[in-house]
Image: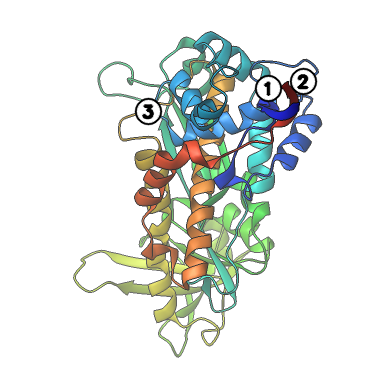
Amino acid sequence: MGVMARRFNLEEVGIAVFAEAFPLEKIREILKATGREGKRKRQLPAAMMMYYVIALGLFVSVGCREVLRRLLDGPMWIWPEQIRVATESAITQARQRLGAAPIERLYREQVVPIAKKITRGAWFRRWRVVTLDGSTLDVADSDKNAAAFGRPGASRGRSAYPQTRVVGFVENGTHVVFGAEMDRYQVGEVTMARRILRLLRRNMLCLADRNFANYPLWKEACATGAALVWRVKTQFILPKLRKLPDGSYLAKFYPSAKHRREDREGILVRLIDYRIDGFREDYRLVTNILDPIQAPAIELARLYSERWTIETALDELKTHLRGRGIVLRSKLPELVRQDVYGLLLAHFGIRWIMHDAALSEDISTAELSFVHTLRVVHRKLPWFISFSPSGARLRG
């Protein structure tokens, strides 16, 4: 009599723990839209390679072939005769066929702010709090990467590694890094920030460091309708117009000293000067929330301290996911782009899990450990793999 034996189907491989964050249907849709779905049946199909690139972000310090083995470890227990771990050459060819476009598109479409109204630490009054900032990542030292991304200057000769600059937003309450752009090291953070301001919404409050405080960027950010609380340098000249009951001042932000002298094109702002107890450094904030009743100065000063949330999120990317001192693996610029967005997708997947857990326990995500969650995913990955095997008749 015949019984049904299951046959493993590589086309159906996914990471079950990330199934809600990155549904297989969405991945197939993106592959079709980018022309990467593939017509031939391959050893490393495109849909599986999408999940593989995310897995590379989870295991940055591990070799490419070992990452694939870990991804297939669970199914190999069930179908040891059907599964073979591809060679590094085959993996590289599969990555090159896939390219960066589908990975970047998945990031753009899926990685968005996820905080709900009940998410603790995500809101300041009626605003969703986000932070604008940037960082750099070391990439593999190759002539093509150096030409594509450039190197930072060094006091003695050239810098050890080329670097890519990344600028994006962090949702403070969840640490989700969204809207990130990458470019050459020499491209400034302000230039890159202008490309992503369109992602700000009227219900957002955006924090930013003093490096971003310039008139054109401020004007463009105000036009989005978002609330802004940005630090400016203490020597920045902002003529005070009137003191407000909470100790802040109405002031004007001008494009230049000439405009200030002629009182032209000034933007009305609220100015908050303060010093944190125990620190000698003075802080100066500007905000476009002009009414102190809506946002008292003392509350905005406390809120600005949350800007360091992005430092924590970037540390998660650069230290805990990538590994301290680890260089992104790929020697081709297209695959470096794939690496970076795969890293961002892996970070989002971990943060999605943590946010879901925080909601179920009614706690803040700050009370959960990113490192612990990452270790659990590492340890349990073989049993987090999803697949949909097809039936094949086995005669007995």
Q: What residue sits right under mark 1 in the picture?
A: 45
| Kind of residue sitting beneath label 2 | Gly
Q: Are marks 1 and 2 in contact (CB under 8 Å)?
A: yes
Q: Is 31 on the left or on the right of 189, as rendered?
A: right
Q: Which numbered disc flags the more N-terminal residue, 2 or 3?
A: 2
Q: Position of residue 194 (x, y in %)?
A: 61, 47
| Kind of residue sitting beneath label 1 | Pro
Is residue 380 shown to the viewer in this render? yes
The picture quadrant where one finds residue 199 is: bottom right
Dot 1: what SS? Answer: loop
Q: What residue sits right under mark 2 in the picture?
A: 38
Q: Nearer the viewer, residue 196 or 284?
A: 196
Image quarter of the N terminus: top right
- Alpha carbons under labels 2 and 3: distance apart: 29 Å
Q: Nearer the viewer, residue 142 or 390?
A: 390
- Alpha carbons under labels 3 and 1: distance apart: 24 Å
Q: Nearer the viewer, residue 239 or 279?
A: 279
